[in-house]
Image (cartoon, grey):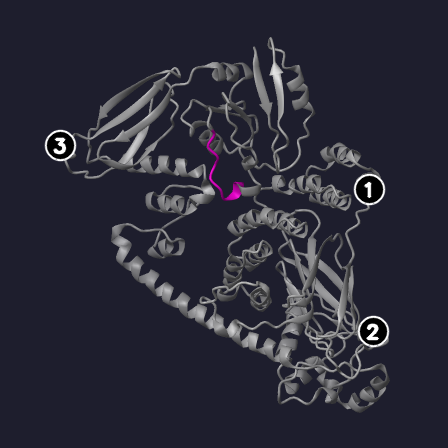
Amino acid sequence: KNTEVTLTVFRDTAQNKQNFNVRNGDWSQLRTTLEAAPRDGASNLHAVDNAQNVGEYLLFSDGLFNYGAAFNTALPKFNAPVYAVNSASEVDGIVLRQLSERSNLGGRLVDLTKQSAEDALAQLREKVRTVRDFKINGASEVVLGSNIITNGNIVVAGVLDDFAAPSLNGAKPAISVTLQLDGESVRTINVPITIDANSDGSARRWAMLRINNLDGEYQLNRAEIRRLGNKFALASRETSLIVLDTVQDYVRHDVTPPLALRKEYDALKAQGQTVALADKRKHIENVMARFSEKVTWWEKRFPKYPNKELAEVAKRDSSRTATLGMRGLATDASPAPSALAPPPAPQAPLARATPEARREISADHVASAPSIASAQVAGNRTAPQVAAKAKDRLQVGDTNGNTASNSTTASITLKGWQANSPYSGRLREAEGDAVYRAYLDEAPSYTNSSGFYLDAAEILFEKKQTALALRVLSNLAEMNLENRGLLRILAQRLLQAGQPKLAIPVLRKVLQLAPNEPQSYRDLGLALAADKQYQAAINMLYEVVERPWHNRFPEIELITLADLNGILATANEKLDVSKIDPRFIKNMSLDLRAVLTWDADNTDIDLWITDSLNEKVFYGNRFGRQGGRMSLDFTGGYGPEEFSLREAAPGIYTIQAHYYGSRSQVASGPTTLQVAVTTGFGRATAKQKVITLRLKDRAEQIYVGQIEIGK
């Protein structure tokens, strides 16, 4: 009837507290404020502080805390009773129950999906009987089902220290429980334990209670939940219902078998570990061989022909056109650069119908790189197999073949995404508070559109309303908790906004959802580096290098090694590299690097770079005459595709992305791509810009931006 209420609305962050005085039951001002509060943003419970002098908390939430530290941090423990009220059909009841009961102060979970408002109100008014303390004499690992006494029942379980002993240290096994009744009176009861050696139900019941207690802080207890599920054959978030017919099934799913199968299980497990170790060594040597080829490319010097010499070079080298497939990646045994064919005119994309045909062509380019002889195979391909030459004139950049590394300046201009939807025009025209109000007005029509939130956030960023932009962006975490594509987009956009601390827990969630995709490790490693957690970053990135991956992720190890070595070269602190094969430690700094990634699996996007000589470097022309190198073609993953150029001639470099289509079975809206462009990569003077773009139509060619390299 008469009380004081402090309201905290929490989303991605907590808003400023508001205080209300309720007198004679009049709470109209509080009600009006609640009704006007926009339902917007992700759910970060850790943004709420544990205030002092609070009589009780009312927490209105579905328990799906999906932002900030919520992914991998312990639940907060409030210093007053917590009544968690839920009305959502999709709810994490375990989290809400633990939040309300863990204080042992009388809180509880009120579920409006299972009871009427009148019953819920009666439950809130009811005095709660709770368990203040409990123990089992002579037992360990004791767990309590709930500290709320329901219908006079309390469930307690534990593991007796000596099951066979009739007594424990002279005392019979007993349960001791201290109860608080009606919020005031306290008493202790003791219950003797009767040991039944023929009963095996208690162990599983104990394991179930233990898992329920651990599940409230799932991210912190995943390994223990998995061990309990495997040992006691219980389904949980870490275990599933699987068929275990043979000992091979137990090995495959890493489940401890019955004693009768243990010997064979241990032998097969040891054999599998030996094979896995041999595969890992073979994988490392394979990566090392490809890394050495990249080092050979990086150590080679490529001429930068002046305009006046171009005609003479073309005339002198016209007889060697069959070597164009090599694109300048010569070994020591190859002829000097001046003996190579003249730079080709810009090339149109390869005429191909299938990703398999593309892989064949890309493989030929890889095979051709080390030697002239194998390069002639690609050079002798027919026009439909390779490409039709475009008619653009060839232009050149630097003079006298000098390197550009020590004397160049660079500017990066990337084309920002400009949505042309009706709502985007409305938001751009608005100013001040009207921008967010217009967004809230449009939002109910686009609740399932990731593009809407990305567009709105981008406009708010442009208008320097950063806090609101981050709130709007955080809605991607609410849309689909298990969609790693959406979470990747969210994390990348947070990194672009200079918020690595917010991006890191999102990417940890992605890694949990997709531990068999190398991009999960690379993305998290780069986010850790952006947060200056350099040691953790290189450790995470090396996971990509040393683990064997499916062949649909070609050359991702080499791209990640470039990331790793770039961090080692620029971190300004001594890092522990004892776990890294020393042969991989070589910083190959670059004048120019561009890396393309995207969010949709089974999607084919290509990175195209037209250099200052007007030569297009892409999957079908991987090695440019100026020295540019394009990584292997990704046709069924998320990228990355990487363009590298050690010494860039002055001039304009144009970046494009070509979207060929998607075979993804998941409908998650338009494909979103990110392009990271770095000048001076691997050097203290490095500068980077990152852009996010959305694609709509197959065969769409997107202009990303340009880099101007000056003397």
Q: Quadrant of residue 3?
A: top right
Between residue 608 and residue 376, name the one nearer to us.
608
- Span highlighted in magenta in the image: 70-78
Measure the alpha-carbon separation of dots 2 and 1. 40 Å
State which quadrant residue 156 falls in: top left
Q: Where is residue 595 in the image (x, y as percent from the top left)?
A: 67, 63
- The residue that label 1 is drawn on is 428
For marks 3 and 2, the one nearer the N-term is 3
> Reading the chain from its start, which is encountered first: label 2 or label 1?
2
Helix, strand or loop under label 3: loop
Considering the numbered disc 2 on the image, is that residue within a helix, a strand or a loop? loop
Between 8 and 228, the one lying in front of the other is 8
Q: Tell which tag, 2 or 1, sits nearer the viewer.
A: 1
Secondary structure mostly seen in magenta is loop
Q: Quadrant of residue 6?
A: top right
Q: In this view, does 343 lie to the left or right of 529?
A: right
Q: Which amino acid does label 3 sit on?
A: Gly
Where is residue 548 shown, x and y percent of the image?
49, 65
Residue 380 in sight here: no
What residue is pinned by disc 2?
390
Taking 201 as reference, is 503 left or right? Answer: right
| Residue 633 in picture, x, y percent from top left | 65, 67
Q: Residue at x 48, y 68 (%)?
A: 580
Q: Can residue 548 be seen in this view?
A: yes
44 sits left or right of 690 in the view = left
Residue topped by disc 3: 170
**First-in-chain label (3 vs 1):** 3
Number of other residues with Cα within 10 Å of mark 2, as a class: few under 14, some 14 to 19, many 20 or more: few
Say which residue appears at 80% left-offset and 42% top-offset: 424
